[in-house]
Structures are given as structure tokens and as C-alpha cells.
Image (spheres, rainbow, N blue to C red):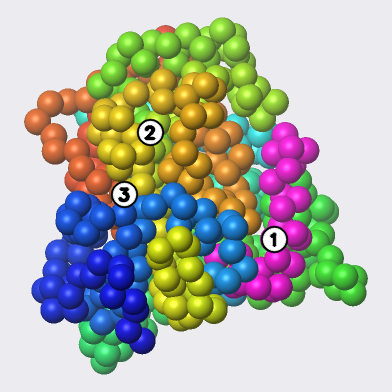
Amino acid sequence: MTLPSSIPAVSRFRSFADSRATAANPVEVLQKYNQEFGDTFRFYLGGIKEAIVTIDPAVIQHVLKTNSENYKKSDIQVKRMGHFLGKGLLTTHGEAWRTQRRLIQKGFDRKQLEALSSIMQDSLTDSLRQFDSQIHNGPVDIYPHLMKMTFAMVARSLFGARLKDEDIDLISHTISTVQEFIVRQTLQPYLNPWFAATGELRKHEEMRATADNVLLEYIRMRRHEEPGSDLLQTLMDARYADGEGMPDSLILSESMQLLVAGHETSSNALSWLLYLLSTHPDVLDRVRNEFDEILHGEPLNFTAVPKFVFTTQVINEALRLYPPFWMIDREAVADDRVGDTVIPAGSTVIVYVYGAHHAPRYWENPETFDPNRFTKENSAAQPPFTHLPFGGGPRGCIGGNYAMLQILMILSTLLGKYDLELPPGQTIEPRAMVILRPKNGIRMSFTDTVPSQVPVPAGCPY
């Protein structure tokens, strides 16, 4: 299909010539295109698949909310991700998605998040024992530590305390490896025949199958146990209109997709958040003071979340600068128009979240870290659909409140226990994969602010 020439276009030849650079750093390439072609333009993914890319809030609002029924998940998610993750909230659309969304939403309501707070806190306490034993030998890359911490928390929120550490590690490694492979399949689609011929595709399928079998065993065991208070119980208790529950295969798919969506989002946000706080000590002090004034040394639970006004501003600004999901893709079902932008049926539309968050026309000094952008007054004046850390419209992130609880809980614990410092000589920059990760990691030094309450394993040299 040839899209309307009224939308500025990057030629197929240039798109293909830039495809390796796009695979290595799509944000850098798309930022360059934005500057050259404006808020909405066309280009070819990998030099092959034509797509409309936009940072225009009017177009974004139309696609994600106003006329969302006309836009389904694209092949990138439905086919590529669905191939590895099965059919669930991330990879379905239409009535099947609406039904699943209604069933799963209960797992993220206020009552359930209150119940999950203690599971999350227990998981964090266990993770801190490992973290504390590793930080006293010098600076550490915080990204893998935080990813392990958040993944364990999400996994235990889903499957309860019985999930073994070795199973958590296996599933986490599988998810990260498969995500990297999906990005390569998407940004360099001409390599897909090579992936199949060389066994790369099969290798990743076998990794997925191994992780699936581990989780499926937990699901089957739970069928014969007393009910729990975790998210798995929510999935097992859910009933369709005919009174039937989800089969184990669908519970597996939804569980895996919640793990994918839940763990790296928060660990990524926390990594960038700690980086920004370490370079803005005045903001760090205000965040610490707010935690002290509200918590008085007690663990954080969901009831306290609305009280953290300034810290929430800081988190929102970190999510603006480094949005975990740097793009959202949709496919038009029928012909559509937003103002002068014509979107033919079948068109792939890429909502370029990172570009919207960094656009000078929507944000003053967009590269500057400024939590005051998100005071109540300033937020009210900000154009809608220019800040999209959890997406927008009906398909906005179902676990947004869980993510905020998780980020606040981990941040309050780390800042209450440790002073942090960013060693010099690092190049800190993002790498856009499925999630916007720190390309070279973020090395940081931690020292106790108070005598450690975490037991030191016997035999440790300190």
C-alpha cells in the first residue's frame, strides 16, 4: 500500500540504508527524522514495512483513545510477541482483549494491591540480603540488580512465596533474551529467513518452552492447594459469563505477559531515577525528607502512595526523560483521518513516545531534569497525550498503580538504607530495545546511612 504523499516521507532507500543504525539505536534515527520531517512522517521499518510515525498529541489521542476501536495491535506484537508469549492482554485485541482485561483488572484494584503490599515487602527484604552482600566491594551496575529485585517482586506477586530463586532467574533470563531477539526480528525483518535457517529461531522457541513448563508446573500445583492472595489466584478465580474459568494454558500466557510487562518497566524506571537523583542532590534530599515525614521508618504500603506528592513529580519527570516503553504501535482497521493526516486501512502507526516526551514545542528545555513540570498546576496546563509513560486510552497499562507502588517501595527502602554516588568517567545513555535500557549500565556506589539490619552471611570478608 502507498500512503498519502501529503505526509512527509523518508524514502525506502534511505530507510534501508539506515536500518542497521535503526537496529542499533532507533531513538537516535527517529529523533533525526523528527527534526527533518516534523511531528508526523512516513518511513520503512528495516527498509521493508511502511509506517507512520507521530509525536503529534492530536494524532496520538485519536489513535489511542478517541477512535481506538479502529486501531488494533500491530503484527509486531500480535505475531512476533504472540509467537513467544501466547495470546493474552499484550497480544490480543477486540472482544477477546476486552474480556480478558475485565477479568484481570480485579488483580490491580485497591484491595488487591493492599494485599500484595506484604508479599512485595517480603520479596524486597529477601532481595536486599543479596544486594547488601554485593555492594561493599565497590561500585555495581544497578540495572541488573534492580531488574532481579523487581522481577522477584513481580514473580512472587504472581505466584506467591513458593517460587524458587533458580526458577525466577531462569524465567527472567529467558524473557530478556527473547525480547532482544524480537527487537532484531522487528527492526531487521530481512534477517528472519536467516534466523530460521541457522536455528536461532528454534533456540529461542526452546528457551520459551522451558520457561513455560516451569510456570505451568506451578499453576498445576496451585490447583491442589489452598487459595492464596497473589495474582495467580485472581487469574484462577476469574469466571467468564458462562461460569467457566481460564484454562491453564491461558493462565500461563497471561502470567508470562504480566511478568514481561511488569518487571523490566519498574527496574528500568528505578535505574534512571537513581541516576537522576545521584546527579541532583537537592532533589534527593527533598525525596528523602518526604519519605521520612510520611513513613517514620515504617514499610510503605499502597494506602500511603497518594501522600508522596513531590516524589511522584520526580518519578513522572524521570519517566518523561526515559520512558520505559519508548514507542507504541497500532494498525488501522479502516481508513481514517485526523485533521490533515490521512491514515489508510492497514497502516502501521507508531506513537513515538520518546519523541513526544522530548519535543521542544511541548516541553520547555526538554532535556533538563525538572520535577516542577508535574506540579498540579503545571500538569493541568500540559497538553494531553504528551506524557505517556504507561500508554494512554483504553489500552493504557493495567499495572500502572502496581508499578508506582513498586517504585516507591523500593526507592524508599534504598534511600532509607544507603547513600549513593555515581562514579565519574561513565557514559550514561539509553538503548531502545523493547524497553529503553541504559546502554552501558549505570555503575553506582552505595554506603550504609545507618548500621545494616540485613544479616551478613557467615564467612563474608567484611
Ranked by sequence position, the earlier of labels 1 and 2 is 1
Q: Quadrant of residue 299?
A: top right
Q: Quadrant of residue 222?
A: bottom right
Task: Find residue 101 and name its label.
Answer: 1
In terms of secondary structure, where does tag 1 sit? helix
Q: Are marks 2 and 3 in contact (CB under 8 Å)?
A: no
The image shows residue 429, relative to residue 34, as above or below, that is above
Q: Which residue bears the numbered disc 2?
A: 318
Ranked by sequence position, the earlier of labels 1 and 3 is 1
**Residue type at tag 1:** Arg
Q: Is residue 47 visible?
A: yes
Question: What residue is drawn where x is 28% and y is 75%?
Answer: 5
**What is the magenta range?**
88-115
In terms of secondary structure, where does tag 2 sit? helix
Residue furthest right as drawn: 243
Residue in front for this viewpoint, 298 or 27: 27
Task: Find residue 355 and name its label.
Answer: 3
Residue 21 belongs to magenta span: no
